[in-house]
Structure formats: C-alpha cells, structure tokens
Amino acid sequence: DIQMTQSPSSLTASLGDRVTITCRASQSISSYLNWYQKKPGKGPKLLIYAASILQSGVPSRFSGSGSGTDFTLTISSLQPEDFASYYCQQSHSVPPFTFGGGTKVEIK
Amino acid sequence: QVHLMESGGGVVQPGTSLRLSCAASGLDFSGYAMHWVRQAPGRGLEWVSFISYDGNTKHYADFVEGRFTVSRDNSKNTLYLQMNSLRAEDTAVYFCARDGWTAVTKYYFDFWGQGTLVTVSS
C-alpha cells in the first residue's frame, strides 16, 4: 500500500500569511493527489484534485502543485475561514484510498 | 444542490451491530460510486469502504476484516454501511462521500455529508 506523509502536522500562522503544506507519497502516484479541508463538526471539503485542479467554488488563494512523490498545497493569503485541518489523499493505487495524517492550521 | 445526510449512529456495546445510512439528494445517485470515510476522536481521516455505482464492486480497508458490509439502494438514493462485531477502535464519526471519478483525474471525493457519530463502549 502507498503511504502518505504530510508535513508539518501543525502550524501557526497569521492572517495574510502565505502557507505551504507538503505531502509525500511512498512511491510515485503521478498526479493523482487530492486535498481536503476539514473543520470541526463539518464534513470534509474538496479543495484540489488531480494535484492542481481547483474544485468549483474554492477560492483562488488555494493552489496545488507537484507530481510523482512530492506535492504542495499553498494558501496564498490566509483568511479567517482557512483555519482548519488539511488532508492529502492519493488515488493512484487503490484500494486503499490513503489519506495523509493531516495538517492543522492554527492562528498565531 | 447536492446533499448527503448520514444517520444511524449511536452508542453501542462492543460486539454488537449498527447500520448507517446515507441519504442523497440533488445528484444522480445511481451514476456515481460512493465511499465511507471515518474520523476517530483526535485522529485523521481514514477511508473505510467503496461501492461502485451499480453496487457490483466493493472494497474495504484492511481493518474492516470482514465485519462491515457496504450496500446501496439506487431506487431510494441511499447508501448503507452494516457494521458488525464492533470494537472500541471503531468509535468515530462516519462520513459518506461521492466519488467524482473521471478517466483523467481518477478518484476524488467531491461531496461529503456532515457525518454520524458511532461510539462503541461498554
């Protein structure tokens, strides 16, 4: 099975900061990498799929990049509603549909 | 407007059973594969199960070990997860999610419910 490793596991940032979260796959997954946002008490929300495609309705401050084993989610200017947890997920070799361990973005 | 709503969670004792439901509206339910994903308290997201659009293909996470069965009733726009022999480690919020698969992008979970809490405790 492919393992997904996210870093950092948590970070603190201020409004307006540029935030970068990384995700590494244990083997090449081409561009089959998705990113989700999760807030307490709510279902996850798809942000980015296929590494770089912005889901409809998601603000353009979110972007994704990468291929092979290394991927990045970037929030260009952190907004109050962006404080949440973020998860990557591989869809190259399934099942299982493996998620990363998550990154919690907190207010500085 | 796509809406997925889970139900059926509750507090149960170890070794007992529970059936979760996920009612779908605002989408062509019968045209999409579906998933169950869970999140244990203080933990990350964990994929549980997959079912194809027609119910003919099913996959499960290794930890299921034959205890869970996913099914769907396309005439009722409803997804199910029958969970037997529940363990304390199955305690989690369970989410259903639609799979927006395409040949180019492969699998991604584009719509999710709010989740239903399952607590397994004696």
Image: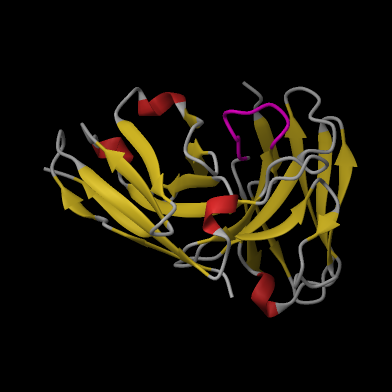
Foreground residue among B29 and B83:
B29
Image quarter in which the C terminus of chain A is found:
bottom right
Image quarter in which the N terminus of chain A is found:
top right
Rendered position, B20 above or below B16: below
Residue at the far front in the pictured view: B75
Residue A42 screen position, x and y as percent: 49, 67
Seen at 34% across and 35% down, the residue is B69
Residue B40 screen position, x and y as percent: 39, 47
Q: How many marks are shown on the rendered structure? A: 0
Q: Is residue A44 visible?
A: no
Q: What span is colored magenta in the figure?
A: A91-99
Characterize the magenta stretch by its predominant secondary structure. loop
Residue B105 screen position, x and y as percent: 79, 44
Q: Is residue B50 magenta?
A: no
Seen at 76% across and 62% down, the residue is A55
In which quarter of the view is residue A97 placed? top right
From the viewer's perspective, is A88 left or right of A61? Answer: left
Seen at 88% across and 36% down, the residue is A67
From the viewer's perspective, is A4 left or right of B81? Answer: right
Foreground residue among A25 and A57:
A57
Seen at 68% across and 42% down, the residue is B107
Residue B42 screen position, x and y as percent: 43, 51
From the viewer's perspective, is A32 left or right of B56? Answer: right
Rendered position, A36 above or below A90: below
